[in-house]
Amino acid sequence: MGDATAEEPEAGSEAGSEAGPRAWSRAWMEGLEIRVRGRVQGVGFRPAVWRFARELGLAGEVVNDGQGVLIRAGGPADALARLLARIEHEPPPLARVEQIETRAFAGELAVQFRIGASAAGQARTQIAPDAATCAACSAEIADPAERRYRYPFATCTHCGPRLTIVTGIPYDRAATTMAGFGLCEPCRRQYEDPADRRFHAETIACPACGPRARLIPLGVGAAAGAADAADAAAAVDAACDLLDRGEIVAIKGLGGYHLACDATREGAVQQLRERKHRDAKPFALMALDLEMIRRYCTLDAAEVAALTGPEAPIVLLAATGPAQLPAAVAPGLATLGFMLPPTPLHLLIARRLARPLVMTSGNLGGEPQVTRDEELAPRLGRIASYALVHDRPIAHRVDDSVVRVMGAMGAMGAMGAVGATGAGGAARLVRRARGFAPAPVALPPGFAGAPDVLACGGDLKATFCLIARGEAVVSQHQGDLASPAALDDYRGSLALYTALHAHAPAAIAVDLHPDQRTGEIARERARGGRVPILAVQHHHAHVAACLADNARPLDAPPVLGVVLDGLGLGDDGAIWGGEFLLADYVRAERLAALAPVAMLGGDRAAREPWRNLYAHLGAALGWPTVLARFGALAPVRRLIGKPLAALDAMLARGLQAPLASSCGRLFDAVAAACGLAFERQAYEGEAAMRLEAAVDPAALGEPDERAYSLELAAPPERGPPRLVPRAMWAALLADLAAGTPGGVIAARFHRGLARGIAEAAGILRGRHSFDTVALSGGCFQNRILLEECERRLRARGLAVLLHARVPANDGGLSLGQASVAAARLLRGGAG
């Protein structure tokens, strides 16, 4: 480096400040070393600092290293102060400044402020999530005068792949899957020009030097001897021609393959269902722009913000537009999941076809999304006829994120559009993946000094969480771990995060259930017992995740956690799933619960709703009474044809009939009574989703007394009070007998459940001390239930905490486990 006093810049040179040229002299020169931590690599942070420093007339340099960004700057004190202010308040769009540290610096400085080479060091920085194509790159690939015209891999520092291509830290091209693509001279000039938006954009590429797309015949329906389309533009055009003819095409995206077809062709959609063995689960959709989405859905401001943000998630929208898509896209549901094109490749396809496309995960049911090209033919060859592939490797599988706008209040400190409130509510994550992971969640006040913790989450909607240096890093959605491939993928992702963060946990948090697959992984990581394993009760973890999502301080008083989900092992060894817990981060006390009902057939009850209907009717009214009063009803007649004697024997002997306070099974039973998914569920939550979709909006405005009643009652034996649906079932069956429309019955159930929850909270508040309620668990992905509960609880003067940055479902479980474990360690193992 040159000595800052060795030479003086000429008037008008780049070293001049905003106030005009200045001469350097030791008399007014100060030196400062600035350490910036957070998401500051691969997002254009160094060129932004370079621009600030040159405009302020400062000397020095900025570099990347293993801890983030390091700046050494010299100049007048006021200019240095302005540099710090601009770093804090004017970072690049994808940057997130977590911490700025300063100290005096007396070493040599370059006279012309420069960007230095990255330095090696222990990993202490964040990897940015993948970001959708920015406006500048979108315009560029549409401009015939640009050399990246119609290039499917145009990116800059403001957009493009990050997590999906990273192989190490610091984030440089050599530590990504772009390492094998050498730069042509024009790209190199842009890469080395600090004034260019592609300066040190590690994914920079063009048709001359970057990844290339091609279309290949894959499997079923492919023309014999079809030639590859190796030119990128020709490959995209050929793929669009196939989609236009109703073919199914596999498309290589950022974090895995998609399976695409024309969403307006019912035959194509149905064929995709048959080949993918996906009977009814809704398909994700991609549209060119908001105007196209508005043909099929209504949008509010929060939904527009979520769709158009750099995360580009799938957003669940009310299917109330003037046009309709085939019913096979989302059978039995009233919502459609739309996203805008996340990459230039997707954008080129959307522009060419100008109609919605199904864009679903490239996998078979229960398996993780295909990411490796060698898996393409064996795993997707029986589904897609052709594949639009490219030669940029995917380092890490990352699925599409899913967002739903609901609930009145945003979450504290939520990033991007998530948590932003609009007329229809706030954007809340249902699945946290592309665009959001691995962005950390800052731990609440009081967690400073928390030791490193690994939390392994649950087996369904699996994620893991690393607590390191005062923040929680929640992984992308890992899927359901019943599949060996998904379990292997989970292990691979965990190894990556551990390496990137140089993570050595002081403890590992797991679910209380001893047979979880994540528990097996915890035992592997415990290094023969040298790292303690802390078990965290499932529903306590849900509440803690909601507290952390809302930055509730560690020393805040307990809240009433209302957790409604399918099931989780309780502290008493029973199956829980409809819980009222007085909880903070350290402890949880069960104050009340839904009345437990037998799960007839064990796990089969979660797949066959009629079993839950029979169990609930028997528990609430008694089967002889049901037969006597309502034997002519269609759902009762259907039950008569089932093997009820065998179920009664199971119940009498206590075999394969565990009692469960599960709200999910209550939803299943009501859906079955309404004739929705009576026999079986094609996917988890189908019955509940169909029941929500069936609600008649007009019936939500009925007088409160028409809502079905649930009452908080003392249990017949020792234990917490129970929320009993006896009156609910009597009223529901009477409505069926009177011919009340199913949409009205569904509305009365939702409103009655919410009223029962709010009334129970009011009663419990009179017995215990709390002023805040946290709502968590997968049942609170139901917009009607969430908003009815929130409204009624607030009307009682209670503050309400909702999820936003992590899902209310089991996808947020790992954050809650990690928070509980860290809190207990900070409190000396209390709990």
Image (spheres, rainbow, N blue to C red):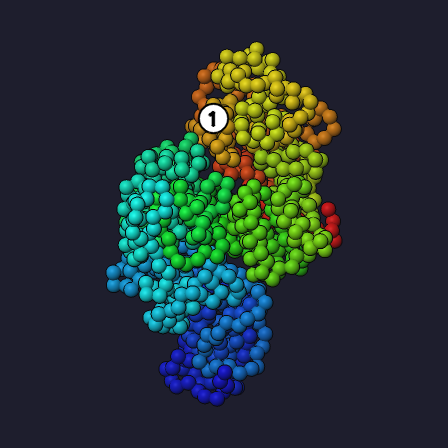
> Residue reaching furthest bottom?
6
The residue at the point 57 percent across, 39 percent down is 777
Question: Residue 157: percent from the left, percent from the top?
Answer: 42, 63
Give the residue pinned by disc 1: 676
Q: Is residue 255 above or below residue 48?
A: above
> In the depicted view, which residue is nearer to us: 211 or 805?
211
Regarding residue 397, the answer to whether it shows in the image is yes
> In the depicted view, which residue is nearer to us: 20 or 730?
730
Q: How crowded is the residue under tag 1: few (<14 C-alpha within 10 Å), some, or many (20+)? A: many
> In the depicted view, which residue is nearer to us: 673 or 298?
673
Question: Residue 38: percent from the left, percent from the top?
Answer: 53, 62
Locate residue 296 relative to residue 86 in the image: left or right: left
> Residue reaching furthest front?
225
Question: Residue 79: percent from the left, percent from the top?
Answer: 48, 75
Kind of element beneath mark 1: loop
Total label count? 1
Question: Residue 233: percent from the left, percent from the top?
Answer: 29, 56
Disc 1 residue type (three-letter): Leu
Q: Is residue 819 above or below residue 280?
A: below
Regarding residue 583, the answer to whether it shows in the image is no
Q: Is residue 325 above or below residue 124?
A: above
The residue at the point 74 percent across, 49 percent down is 830
> Residue reaching furthest left?
144
> In the depicted view, which residue is nearer to us: 274 or 160?
274
The residue at the point 48 percent across, 39 percent down is 365
The residue at the point 60 percent across, 62 percent down is 502
